[in-house]
């Protein structure tokens, strides 16, 4: 394993590089950092892949000024600095949306995308009344006066770790502790993440441009919108398949890392080797 930082306009990205073989780039969720992939990396490396991951601006050990930036350009900067021409992108949640956006904007750099509870810009799969109530409670904690970062972190750990409406503590203790540890500094009002320049037009209006193979994995214990997004991709993207697991929520790589890694390996196995 090697770690290094790369300079990007107005910031610095912390990168971790493991293994050798066709490169896979892992993209973390918006409530986490690259450590969310800790248990997914070893089985991918053992399967013969080079696995690269990085902290997005303002997450983990990466830094940024409060400036507009393209997260897609940051992703390509990581590939360039790593000497990678093409990679398979595996993204969780926010990272899944970034993977889809990059595959649309820079198709020559992306071999395939695995979206893990990933979103699609401009698509809304709706919410149940129970989920609407959870969102209202989420907003109330987020906007409470005085603001309590620890309370917001605890709420997020329950929603994204255990799953909306699931019993507290469903996510195993070590994963729950790590998720809270990653999320807490992100909720600090002084945290600076920069201002993302969104893909324009949004991905949902450009699914025909998503030409690489896509595997969209969702959990039935997650918000229903996530499941609908996976099914929407299967129906409307040129080469996409949806997989819905009935026993996981949002942070699938932290819940069932071996199973996720196995699914990724099976999906990528038929591909010609890339670099």
Image (spheres, grey):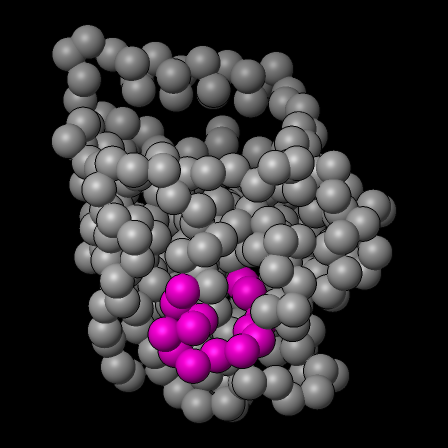
- Please name whichever residue, 262 or 74, is drawn nearer the observer in this view of the structure: 74
Residue 236 seen anywhere in this rendered image of the structure:
yes
Q: Is residue 175 above or below residue 42?
A: above
Query: Is 107 on the left-hand or right-hand side of 12?
Result: right
Q: Position of residue 203 (x, y in %)?
A: 66, 42
Q: Position of residue 184 (x, y in %)?
A: 21, 39
Q: Position of residue 138 (x, y in %)?
A: 39, 21
**Snapshot quadrant of residue 186:** top left
Figure quadrant of the C terminus: bottom right
Task: Tell which residue pokes out farthest to the front in this image.
Answer: 9
Residue at x 36%, y 74% (from the top left corner): 81
Q: Is residue 274 above or below residue 57?
A: below
Identify the magenta region: 77-90
Whether 176 is among the magenta residues is no
Query: Is 136 on the left-hand or right-hand side of 126?
Result: left
Figure quadrant of the N terminus: bottom left
Residue at x 62%, y 53% (from the top left corner): 105
Q: Position of residue 196 (x, y in %)?
A: 41, 38
Residue at x 40%, y 87% (from the top left corner): 19
Residue at x 76%, y 46% (from the top left corner): 207
Residue 150 seen anywhere in this rendered image of the structure:
no
Whether 89 is among the magenta residues is yes
């Amino acid at each position: 394993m090697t770690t290094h930082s790369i300079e990007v306009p107005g910031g610095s990205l912390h990168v971790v590089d493991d293994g050798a073989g066709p490169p896979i780039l892992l993209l973390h969720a918006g409530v986490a950092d690259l450590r969310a992939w800790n248990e997914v990396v070893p089985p991918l490396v053992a399967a013969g892949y080079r696995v690269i991951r990085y902290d997005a601006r303002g997450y983990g050990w990466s830094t940024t000024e409060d400036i507009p930036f393209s997260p897609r350009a940051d992703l390509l900067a990581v590939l360039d600095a790593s000497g990678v021409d093409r990679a398979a992108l595996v993204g969780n949640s926010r990272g899944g949306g970034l993977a889809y956006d990059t595959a649309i904007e820079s198709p020559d750099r992306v071999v395939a995308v695995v979206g893990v509870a990933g979103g699609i810009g401009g698509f809304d799969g709706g919410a149940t009344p129970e989920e609407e109530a959870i969102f209202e409670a989420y907003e109330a904690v987020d906007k409470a006066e005085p603001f309590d970062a620890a309370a917001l972190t605890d709420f997020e750990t329950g929603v994204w770790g255990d799953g909306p409406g699931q019993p507290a503590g469903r996510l195993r203790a070590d994963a729950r502790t790590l998720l809270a540890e990653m999320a807490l500094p992100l909720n600090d009002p002084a945290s600076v993440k920069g201002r993302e320049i969104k893909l324009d037009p949004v991905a949902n209006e450009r699914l025909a441009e998503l030409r690489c193979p896509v595997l969209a994995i969702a959990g039935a214990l997650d918000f229903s919108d996530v499941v609908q997004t996976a099914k929407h991709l299967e129906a409307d993207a040129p080469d996409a398949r949806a997989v819905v697991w009935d026993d996981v929520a949002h942070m699938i790589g932290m819940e069932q890392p071996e199973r996720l890694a196995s699914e990724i390996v099976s999906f990528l196995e038929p591909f010609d080797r890339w670099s």
